[in-house]
Amino acid sequence: MERYFQEEIECAPREKILAIQNEKLVAQVKHVWDNVPYYRQKMQEKNLTPEDIKSVDDLKKLPFLSKADLKEAYPYGLLACPLKDCVRIQSTSGTTGKRVVAFYTLKDIDIWEECCARAIVAAGGTNEDVCQVSYGYGLFTGGPGLNGGSHKVGCLTIPTSSGNTERQIMFIMDLSATILCCTPSYAAYIGETMKEMGLTPEQIPLKAGIFGAEAWSEEMRRDIEKTLGIKAYDIYGLTEISGPGVSFECSEQHGMHINEDHFLAEIIDPDTGEVLPEGTQGELVFTSLDKEAFPLLRYRTRDICTLTREKCSCGRTHVKMTKPKGRSDDMLIIRGVNVFPSQIETVLLKNGYAANYQIIVDRVNNTDTFDINVEMTPEMFTDNVAEVQNRKKVLESGLHSMLGIKAKVNLVAPKTITRSEGKAVRVIDKRKI
Ligand code: DLL
């Protein structure tokens, strides 16, 4: 049996998981109260002491923590152990203002890597595999997290990091990589390049991909699976809570199991903060259960998804989250309507396009303009104006029924939209609001 299929925990009955969570939560709250004055004050403002938190049922008494709180506490305000016990920081990919800095002790890293190892095993990985990690290495958690997980599983690890696509392909082919870890947009780009090089899925040694760090649709999954001849698994996580591996897909490829022995998940109404019943869509909130350096209680992720405890055919009992639709702060409000880039992607892929698009929003005479530049595939590319016009109409109508508002589609030539080697930049919002 694979060491990182931790059956006794991953397939434990609900009561056992709950008992672990209750015990760990009480200890985590005490740790935070004893060591983080920022939290102690927040709890005191609500007249709470650690004695008020006896089990998971009491979680709702605790205040939420937001990204703004993290920024306010930057850099050391939420550190819960002496700096001499920390061995690493990682940081978010934020582009404006101060980034979030997360601290790790050796034990924190060990647990994080173990979570990534579980994800690799769930995707079929063993110590016979060659795992190419093409997420960025450095402050971003993608590379270091999957690298550590891959070591734990015993895979031969190829730490290519992102970029230099020709070299990525050379290593995949020459070293017979069987597992590819990168963002889904980069996987699509690698696939597209391999296809152009004349490589067929049968010639590509890969068997599985572990793709996450950004929202991607089911259609995009099928597309990547077809081009690379693999099974593509989703993986989710965020720097604040450790990094990749907070949750991961199993053989069912239908929702991601949250590592519930380490992270407690809730879904709340993003407007009122009310905890929502299972199966309802809302904002995902996490509480770490055994962090030493950077424990977070009720951290609001801004990610919109649903939790479900339906029985899973893989045998794992940990709660599953659906693919996040996107972040509530990535969600565009155009002419008053909520639009997620992933909805647009679904329509494009259904109509035979690849996920190469860019959304441009502006405001002219107090009205939002909504343009989508969509790249044609080489097969569709033509100078027949009527045909292009027809394609454009079909796409505009598909988008209209998906989104409820009209967008102007501009079909552009293949390869004219910049490819991403990490998280894709899909939206240019020029509105000054
Ligand atoms: O993106 C960690 C990660 C690395 C996850 C590699 C998976 C693979 P951050 O840069 O802090 O951390 O960004 C976290 O990315 O709140 C989500 O909005 C988004 N995100 C992460 N995974 C997924 C996913 C990493 N599978 C933010 N689907 C999160 C959709 C995702 N969105």
Image: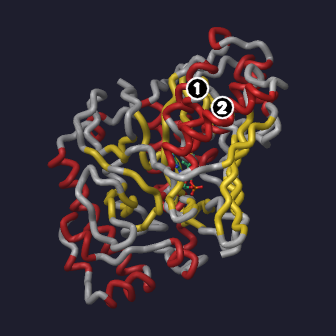
Q: Earlier in the sequence, mark 1 or mark 2?
A: 1
Mark 1 is surrounded, within 10 Å at the Cα level, by few (under 14), some (14 to 19) or many (20 or more) other residues, namely many
Q: Residue at x 57, y 39 (%)?
A: 397
Q: Is residue 62 above or below residue 202?
A: below
- Kindly indicate whether the residue at mark 2 contacts the one at mark 1 (C-beta within 8 angstroms): yes
Residue 368 x/y as whole percent? 65, 64
SS category of the residue bearing label 2:
loop
Residue 218 screen position, x and y as percent: 49, 33
The one of 141 and 250 positioned closer to us in this rendering: 250
Q: Amino acid at mark 2?
A: Ala
- Which of the image's four quarters has the N terminus? top left
At label 1, the amino acid type is: Asp
Q: Residue furthest left?
A: 15
Q: Which mark is residue 354?
A: 2
Label 1, ligand 1: CB separation under 8 Å: no
Q: Position of residue 55 (x, y in %)?
A: 19, 66
Quadrant hosting residue 323: top left
Residue 204 image-quadrant placement: top right
Residue 41 visible within the image: yes
Q: Report the front residue among 104 and 174.
A: 174
Residue located 42% across and 36% down the image: 249
Spatial CA distance of label 1 from label 2 is 8 Å
Count how many numbered circles sit on residues in the image. Answer: 2
User: In the picture, residue 290 is in which quadrant?
Assistant: bottom left
**Residue furthest front as drawn:** 386
Q: Which residue is mark 1?
A: 223
Model colouring? secondary structure
**From the viewer's perspective, is 320 left or right of 299?**
left
The quarter in which the C terminus is drawn is: bottom right
Residue at 45% x, 84% y is: 38
